[in-house]
Image: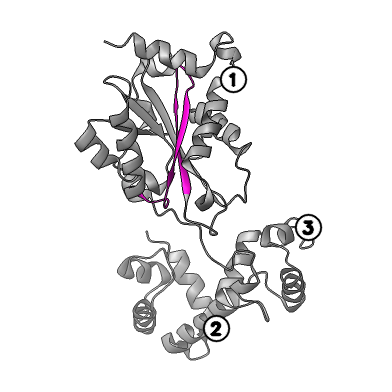
Amino acid sequence: MSHHHFTPIERGKIEELSKLGYSSRGIGERIRRHHSSVSRELKRCCESDGYKAGEAQEDYGKKRQGSKPHGKWNEELDALIADKLKSTWSPEQIAHTVSLGKVSFKTIYNWLYAGRLTGITVQNLRRKGKKKSCRNLPFYARGTPIRKRPREVYGRKTFGHWELDTVVPQRGKENTCFATFIERKTRLYTACLMPDRTAASMEKAITHLYRLLPDNAFLTATTDRGGEFACFDNIKKYLGLTLFFADPYCPFQRGSNEYGNGLLREFFPKGTRFHSVRQEYLSHCLFLINSRPRKCLGWISPLHAFLHELSHLT
């Protein structure tokens, strides 16, 4: 047996069969509905002159309109939420404090986008209704993830595995930036100036360092998911070098490079205008960084360790 409400057609059949003298059970058998449902329908809508399908359907429609939930919205709650949103509160802050559990923050967002809040638009939200997007997703899906990096890279026992990144002066203020590189085993840190933070400029920087080093001194590179590393296909094609992409929001997977960038910031703090930096001064700063003895290297300098590894290349 079905469990949905009677349709207009079924009500018409009930009217005709009841006029012919059929019982509730007989009507139920013919319209394939339970006789109890038919009996309740006849009692609810039967008048002195018998059951009327049209009047029964009209009565059903009125009752259905009254049975629909009206939701939690009311003028008092609307005024309260609107006042807090104008005071720079977020929907989540409102839902967990002043609304006292009456509505969830998702409901507030739904009301806001539906235009049900008086005098409130998405412009009252902190991010103006804009969703954060990632412009680099297409090439992330094609890049090689860090999980496929050779096992020997993790232990820092082999030479020639690098970590890459960029250092910018101040976002949106200047295009010039640094391309930074650090060798994982010896911790040698180097950098070069780039005219802008684009894939083409990064490709030139990687190619320059790769050709500057002897064979087997640049085997792999691990990078973050910045758009400047969208050149990974060209790097693989022309240099045979694989770029491994770290997981999103996991800077610890490139900890050496992040630490090296911090050392470089001692000489070029945030706000420094990189376009006025001379390569000679940058080279001097890198020499100072690489000449410091490091505890992780047994108190020898990265420069000493790097030259030692170069002398043993085959």
The mark found on residue 292 in the picture is 1
Residue at 48 percent of width and 86 percent of height: 58
The mark found on residue 97 in the picture is 3
Q: Amino acid at mark 2?
A: Lys
Q: Amino acid at mark 1?
A: Arg
Total numbered badges shown on the rendered structure:
3
Residue closer to the observer: 272 or 233: 272
Magenta region: which residues? 177-199
Residue 68 placed where, x, y %? 57, 73
Q: Tell me how far mark 1 sits from mark 3, CA to CA.
A: 54 Å
Residue 158 placed where, x, y %? 38, 13
Residue closer to the observer: 287 or 76: 287
Q: Amino acid at mark 3?
A: Thr
Query: Element at badge 2?
Result: helix
Between discs 3 and 2, the one toward the N terminus? 2
Residue 167 placed where, x, y %? 51, 43
Query: Element at badge 3?
Result: loop
The mark found on residue 62 in the picture is 2
Residue 156 located left or right of residue 114: left
**Relative to residue 26, is residue 132 depicted above or below?**
above
Discs 1, 2 touching: Cβ within 8 Å: no
